[in-house]
Image: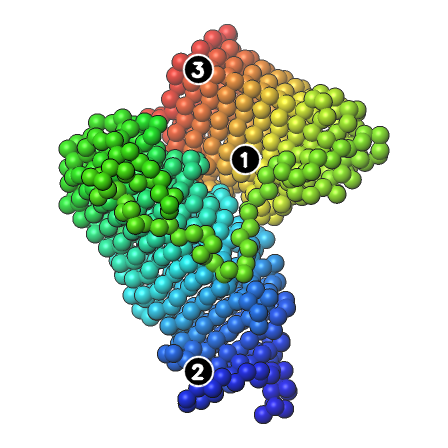
């Protein structure tokens, strides 16, 4: 026996006595031993992966346990077994347990990192994956779709796991209902840490999906409880329920940009969940669609989201809607929820020609709706007589409300669980119950794996003086910088004879504003690469020494393969003389790159032969745009032959909040009229979701072109001065109605 074990590279280390047979732990140290040992496992046995890094290991854990005697696959020490490279895990059989593994530094070569099935015929049942980590285990191709976890089979449990940092396309975790053996599945998903998921910038960034529209009239009976959703910002849906009879309870949603959406399927229960938005933009709550949904005892606070991303939205639908559209809300029961400082609550949301049926046979009772700064946050888009309102308390709501809403001053006080509750005893029966206790972050995920912050803030590190006298001082300082460092440049003129790669979060700042001039001598000065974020403060950049070639770029992202989103900030920067040859651009985004934010303030751009911001690299209309939020404030753009900014978001999907543009108090003078500016627009905005152009002055420039596509885009052009500027051009490419662009209080003087 011993010699066979040795020959297999396996060693029996522990013998646990039981009344009937001895359960064994088999420690294996390589893939061959794993395969060989797997065949010998009996109910109650464990196969133990030796500590260390297992490279390119596609684990097929196929075994049969029995009730009370599972077959276990575990790490020798929890957290000390790393699966890296091209690795994954499939489990199939009955009564299996997996624990203690860490997936990092790699990605799955198949459609899933963890799959509760071997193939379409063999699934896992009565099985459990616990204390497993999937940490930024991303396919380097952002467009390559995979799921981190697919639950198939029945009666499986997924608990105390850590899933954070998914950056490529695909739902983080899905409950799959394809096939009878995966329906009415009674899974339990609990105590998991769903850590930060950055904005994907297209559809397919949901954190948890249960079912699909195809199987949405099938019941799933999945329980999702006591999980912590921490900044799950992938797209508009954090959880997308697309099946029936699920329970979503006692979860915390912390600063997550999106909503818990009852998208398809009937008879779901949403209770005891706590949403903390903390005023972060696009934080949403609960969206109700379909029939027999119950939403009770939830607590929602500080949510800013609007429209489909509101703190609460009950939608209009359609009678006999096709499976993939919006069914009418019937028999909804919404009671004892607290909506505190929730900026938007929408009734009959999405009303249009198709979604013409308001909720019916529904009740909304004993909710507490309170806004401490006062707002018109409750909006009815249709006749809501199909909802019986009773006993709802409101304060600070500046909207006309029907009977069933009572004005009151409940005198809220924060309790020991961190929730605001009415002081007035008589009102204690309204809103979320005083017994509600949100799950703590520390109670979720494996205790042995630290929960990391997703992003390093600018200027959070050291300040390092860069001495101008030394050759390549800036390149060397960048090479030695750590995330968050600030490189402070001594006064002087700095010729830059090389490309400066930005692979960290770094600030480059002039010691005194205007005292530092960078003179790029190559076609590109800065290239932002994966992991990089760049902030420039007080620098002057003069392009006079650039090569005499067309198409130079001052700052760009890496041209392809940009998996990480990035930030770019320019404060009080002056860029001039990018005009040695034609088409010298200030910033050029690579195809499929996504800036979380580009913020340019107090800066000047003068004599530019190309474009300032090129954020229009999507060619295939799949909805992969280049910038989430563009902020331009208090800048001057003069003698720019190309466009000030071109933003493009194609496709017909409505899963994203961006792109957004806020442009205020800029001077735009002689911009966009060069013959190479094909669109002849100073600003070209295609599919931008939220646009605010206010208090700017445009003179002798090309005009603004706004093309609205899907997603209820919201554009306002207000209080600007236009002097000798082509008229605003707008078009509705999707809704086919009159333009919804608001053009207000502008002063328009035209010479001919
Ligand atoms: Ca989606």
Q: CA distance from mark 3 to mark 2?
A: 74 Å
- Label pair 3/2, CB-CB below 8 angstroms: no
Residue 606: x percent and y percent?
65, 19
Q: Nearer the viewer, residue 299 or 143?
A: 299
User: Which residue is located at x 46 percent, y 45 percent?
Assistant: 231
Residue 610: x percent and y percent?
64, 26
Mark before the other along the chain sequence, 3 or 2: 2
In the picture, the quarter occupied by the N terminus is bottom right
- Label pair 1/3, CB-CB below 8 angstroms: no
> On the picture, is 231 further left or further right than 524?
left
Q: CA distance from mark 1 to mark 3?
A: 25 Å
Viewer-nearest of labels 3 and 2?
2
Residue 648 visible in the displayed image: no
User: Which residue is located at x 48 percent, y 70 percent?
Assistant: 98
Mark before the other along the chain sequence, 1 or 3: 1
Other residues around mark 1 within 10 Å, as few (<14) / some (14–19) / many (≥20): many
Give me the disc on residue 597.
1
Give me the disc on residue 43.
2
Residue behind label 2 places its C-beta within 8 angstroms of ligand 1 = no
Give me the disc on residue 736.
none
Give me the disc on residue 719.
3
User: Which residue is located at x 53 percent, y 81 percent?
Assistant: 25
Instruction: Identify whether 151 is placed above or below 345.
Output: below
Q: Quadrant of residue 498?
A: top right
Residue 395: x percent and y percent?
26, 31
Residue 302: x percent and y percent?
38, 37
């Amino acid at each position: 026996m011993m010699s066979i074990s040795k020959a297999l590279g396996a060693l029996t280390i522990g013998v646990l006595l039981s009344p009937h047979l001895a359960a064994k732990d088999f420690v294996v140290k390589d893939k061959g031993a794993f395969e060989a040992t797997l065949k010998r496992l009996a109910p109650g046995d464990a196969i133990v992966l030796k500590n260390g890094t297992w490279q390119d290991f596609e684990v097929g854990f196929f075994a049969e346990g029995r009730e009370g005697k599972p077959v276990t696959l575990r790490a020798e020490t929890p957290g000390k077994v790393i699966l890296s490279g091209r690795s994954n895990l499939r489990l199939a059989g009955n009564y299996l347990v997996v624990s203690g593994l860490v997936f990092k530094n790699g990605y799955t070569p198949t459609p899933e990192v963890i799959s509760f099935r071997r193939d379409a015929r063999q699934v896992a049942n009565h099985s459990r994956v616990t204390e497993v980590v999937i940490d930024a285990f991303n396919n380097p191709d952002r467009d390559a779709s995979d799921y981190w976890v697919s639950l198939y089979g029945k009666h499986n449990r997924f608990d105390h796991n850590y899933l954070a940092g998914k950056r490529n396309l695909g739902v983080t975790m899905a409950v799959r209902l394809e096939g009878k053996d995966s329906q009415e599945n009674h899974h339990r998903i609990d105590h998991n840490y769903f850590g930060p998921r950055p904005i994907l910038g297209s559809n397919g960034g949901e954190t948890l999906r249960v079912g699909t529209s195809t199987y949405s009239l099938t019941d799933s009976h999945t329980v999702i409880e006591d999980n912590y959703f921490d900044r799950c910002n992938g797209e508009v849906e954090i959880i997308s329920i697309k099946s029936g009879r699920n329970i979503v309870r006692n979860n915390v949603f912390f600063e997550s940009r999106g909503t818990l959406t009852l998208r398809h399927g009937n008879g779901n229960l949403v209770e005891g969940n706590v949403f903390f938005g903390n005023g972060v933009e696009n934080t949403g709550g609960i969206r109700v669609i379909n029939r027999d949904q119950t939403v009770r005892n939830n607590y929602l606070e500080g949510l800013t989201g609007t429209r489909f991303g509101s703190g609460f939205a009950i939608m209009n639908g359609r009678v006999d809607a096709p499976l993939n559209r919006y069914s009418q809300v019937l028999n909804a029961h919404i009671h004892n929820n607290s909506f505190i400082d929730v900026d938007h609550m929408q009734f009959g949301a999405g009303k249009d020609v198709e979604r013409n049926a308001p909720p019916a046979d529904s009740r909304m009772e004993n909710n507490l709706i309170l806004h401490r700064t006062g707002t018109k946050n409750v909006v009815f888009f249709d006749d809501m007589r199909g909802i019986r309102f009773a006993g709802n308390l409101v304060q600070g709501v500046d909207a006309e409300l029907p009977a069933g809403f009572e004005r009151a001053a409940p005198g809220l006080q924060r309790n020991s669980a961190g929730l605001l509750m009415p002081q007035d005893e008589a009102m204690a029966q309204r809103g979320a119950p005083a017994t509600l206790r949100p799950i703590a972050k520390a109670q979720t995920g494996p205790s042995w794996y630290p929960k990391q912050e997703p992003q390093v803030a600018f200027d959070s590190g050291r300040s390092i003086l860069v001495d101008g006298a030394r050759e390549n001082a800036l390149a060397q300082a960048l090479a030695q910088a750590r995330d968050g460092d600030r490189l402070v440049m001594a006064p002087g003129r700095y010729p830059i004879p090389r490309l400066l790669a930005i692979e960290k979060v770094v600030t480059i700042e002039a010691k005194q504003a205007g005292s530092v001039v960078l003179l790029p001598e190559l076609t590109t000065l800065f290239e932002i690469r994966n992991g990089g974020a760049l902030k420039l403060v007080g620098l002057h950049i003069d392009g006079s020494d650039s090569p005499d070639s067309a198409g130079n770029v001052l700052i760009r992202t890496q041209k392809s393969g940009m998996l990480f989103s990035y930030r770019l900030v320019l404060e009080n920067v002056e860029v001039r003389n990018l005009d040695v040859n034609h088409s010298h651009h200030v910033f050029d985004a690579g195809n499929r790159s996504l800036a979380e934010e580009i913020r340019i303030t107090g800066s000047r751009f003068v004599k530019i032969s190309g474009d300032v911001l090129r954020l229009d690299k999507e060619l295939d209309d799949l909805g992969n745009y280049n910038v989430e939020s563009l902020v331009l404030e208090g800048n001057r753009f003069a003698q720019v032959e190309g466009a000030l900014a071109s933003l493009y978001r194609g496709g017909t999907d409505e899963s994203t909040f961006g792109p957004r543009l806020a442009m205020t108090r800029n001077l735009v003078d002689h911009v966009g009229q060069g013959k190479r500016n094909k669109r002849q627009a100073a600003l070209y905005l295609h599919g931008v979701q939220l646009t605010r152009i206010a208090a700017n002055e445009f003179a002798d420039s090309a005009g603004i072109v706004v093309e609205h596509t899907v997603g209820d885009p919201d554009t306002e052009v207000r209080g600007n001065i236009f002097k000798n500027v082509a008229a605003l051009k707008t078009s509705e490419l999707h809704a086919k109605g009159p333009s919804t662009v608001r053009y207000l209080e502008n002063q328009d003087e035209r010479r001919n």
